[in-house]
Image (spheres, helix red, strand yellow):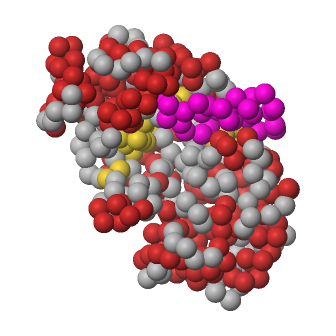
């Protein structure tokens, strides 16, 4: 068990008694609402048991893969054909070199919380820890559903494409467990008209929706049917991963013509693509409002930079970075167009470029109209900003220019069933930030009120906002 002599101890990241009290008395035991992740719903519904620690902890984790490549480890031991044990040992060799990267903290938090292991992971301890963790993970008490129960996960919200059958969400709805599972509608493949394979995707969408997609109107009808289907299966959120919000002036005739050109496999210009993407994004946002969903926009990633490795390994394998796209003007115009029709639903905006923190923190205030608490949110530190410095800067920008008290808090945005201590990490950082300001006299020593604020950000605000 944890003690004050181990690295991951009871007061990890908590620098004074006020921070300790806030965390232990108000935040630690709050349930987790993980309202955005990329977990496999099939693994949850089937209550999967993994064969080895590698399969649940390293496979699919491009954060770890980037670190291993940087250290000079060959791809064979990352995504290649090496054994699970060899992949784990190579990760263990990497861990000491990740100091000051959040991977170092996450790794040891995850070993502690799931496996009660407080030893530091390195080349010397690798064999012993591999055996111990694999023996545990390969047992029913470490099935996916039990892993979620171990961290007190009340709800997890996975992310699905419009063509998804939602069969595993349906399966779990019929056989509920302690943790609820919902989904978020992710229609980016229907929006990004310049992508390779766009027409083939629309053919599949047409088959799934029962709508022959020959015109732009047909596309809207197909997406509307899928939105209704997702709603019927408990969906309350959408999600978009875009470089920036699209907002160009367009006419109905222009959009119809652009779509027709694409379906005829003719080349469309970048300007035409932006007009089309603006039109379909506004259509979708109005549909989300109609359904009462929350819409999420993850903005600012520059994806698939390494063409050679992308061709070999595909997307989401560790070749993405922060982009420096202009954000403010188009985002403002998009939100304003919806608000002017009174069709702006609850909205969460995540940025990947920290230079945009204050832009986003002030943008949300333009459209918080009093209709609901924290209607438009500046989302938590995301991806490359999902670390102590990134979280702190996001919390400070939101505090300085908005109301941190209305913030809906943390999410994992992860593909790993062992990533949920990121909620603990965030909560400790939040409590330390507030505890430090109490100590310095910048906040009153009012534990009842500030403790309530911590509880709200940790759990209550998300519970109220999403209404799962």
Q: Is residue 329 above or below residue 282?
A: below
Left or right, 140 with reference to 219: right
> Which of these two is toward me, 395 or 339?
339
Q: How many marks?
A: 0
Residue 5, x across and y down, in percent: 77, 78
Magenta part of the protein: which range?
Answer: 157-183
> Which of these two is toward me, 174 or 424?
174
Q: Is residue 87 above or below residue 305?
A: below
Residue 380, x across and y down, in percent: 50, 45
Left or right, 47 with reference to 209: right
- Res. 12 visible in picture: no
> Which of these two is toward me, 70 or 205?
205
Q: Quadrant of the C terminus?
A: top right
Q: Quadrant of the N terminus?
A: bottom right
Left or right, 432 with reference to 345: right
- Res. 209 visible in picture: yes
Residue 171 within the magenta-colored segment of the rendering: yes
Looking at this view, name the residue that lies furthest to the top. 341
Residue 387, x across and y down, in percent: 51, 59
Residue 326, x across and y down, in percent: 23, 43
Identity of the residue drawn at 39% across and 34% down: 201
Looking at this view, name the residue that lies furthest to the bottom. 124
Residue 390 within the magenta-colored segment of the rendering: no
Identity of the residue drawn at 48% across and 41% down: 379
> Which of these two is toward me, 324 or 318?
318
Quarter of the rendering containing residue 36: top right
Identity of the residue drawn at 47% across and 50% down: 382
Identity of the residue drawn at 82% across and 38% down: 178
């Amino acid at each position: 068990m944890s003690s004050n002599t181990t690295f991951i101890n009871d007061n990890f990241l908590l620098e004074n008694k006020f921070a300790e009290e806030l965390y232990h008395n108000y935040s630690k035991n709050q349930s987790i609402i993980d309202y955005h992740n990329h977990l496999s719903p099939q693994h949850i519904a089937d209550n999967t048991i993994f064969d080895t620690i590698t399969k649940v902890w390293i496979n699919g984790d491009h954060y770890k893969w980037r670190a291993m490549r940087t250290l000079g480890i060959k791809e064979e031991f990352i995504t290649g054909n090496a054994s699970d044990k060899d992949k784990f040992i190579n990760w263990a060799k990497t861990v000491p070199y990740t100091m000051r990267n959040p991977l170092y903290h996450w790794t040891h938090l995850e070993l502690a919380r799931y496996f009660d292991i407080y030893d530091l992971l390195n080349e010397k301890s690798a064999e012993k820890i591999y055996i111990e963790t694999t023996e545990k993970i390969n047992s029913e008490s470490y099935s996916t559903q039990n892993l979620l129960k171990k961290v007190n996960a009340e709800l997890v919200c996975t992310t699905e494409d419009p063509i998804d059958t939602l069969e595993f969400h349906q399966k779990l709805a019929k056989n509920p467990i302690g943790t609820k599972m919902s989904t978020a509608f992710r229609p980016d493949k229907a929006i990004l008209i310049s992508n390779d394979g766009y027409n083939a995707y629309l053919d599949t969408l047409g088959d799934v929706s029962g709508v022959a997609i020959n015109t732009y109107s047909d596309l809207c009808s197909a997406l509307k049917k899928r939105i209704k289907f997702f709603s019927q299966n408990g969906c309350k959120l959408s999600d978009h991963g875009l470089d920036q919000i699209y907002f160009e002036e367009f006419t109905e005739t222009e959009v119809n013509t652009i779509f027709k050109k694409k379906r005829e496999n003719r080349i469309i210009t970048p300007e035409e693509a932006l007009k089309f993407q603006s039109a379909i994004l506004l259509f979708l946002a109005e549909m989300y409002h109609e359904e009462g969903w929350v819409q999420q926009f993850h903005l600012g990633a520059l994806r698939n930079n390494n063409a050679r490795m992308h061709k070999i390994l595909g997307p989401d394998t560790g070749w993405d970075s922060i982009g420096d796209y202009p954000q403010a003007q188009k985002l403002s115009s998009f939100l304003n167009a919806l608000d002017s029709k009174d069709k702006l639903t609850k909205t969460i905006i995540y940025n990947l470029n920290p230079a945009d923190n204050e832009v986003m923190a002030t943008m949300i205030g333009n459209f918080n109209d009093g209709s609901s608490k924290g209607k438009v949110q500046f989302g938590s530190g995301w991806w490359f900003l999902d670390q102590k410095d990134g979280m702190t800067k996001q919390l400070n920008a939101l505090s300085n220019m908005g109301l941190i008290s209305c913030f809906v808090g943390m999410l994992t945005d992860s593909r790993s069933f062992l990533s949920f201590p990121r909620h603990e990490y965030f909560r400790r950082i939040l409590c330390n930030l507030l505890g430090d300001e109490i100590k310095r006299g910048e906040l009153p020593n009012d534990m009842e009120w500030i403790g309530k604020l911590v509880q709200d950000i940790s759990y209550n605000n998300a519970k109220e906002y999403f209404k799962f």
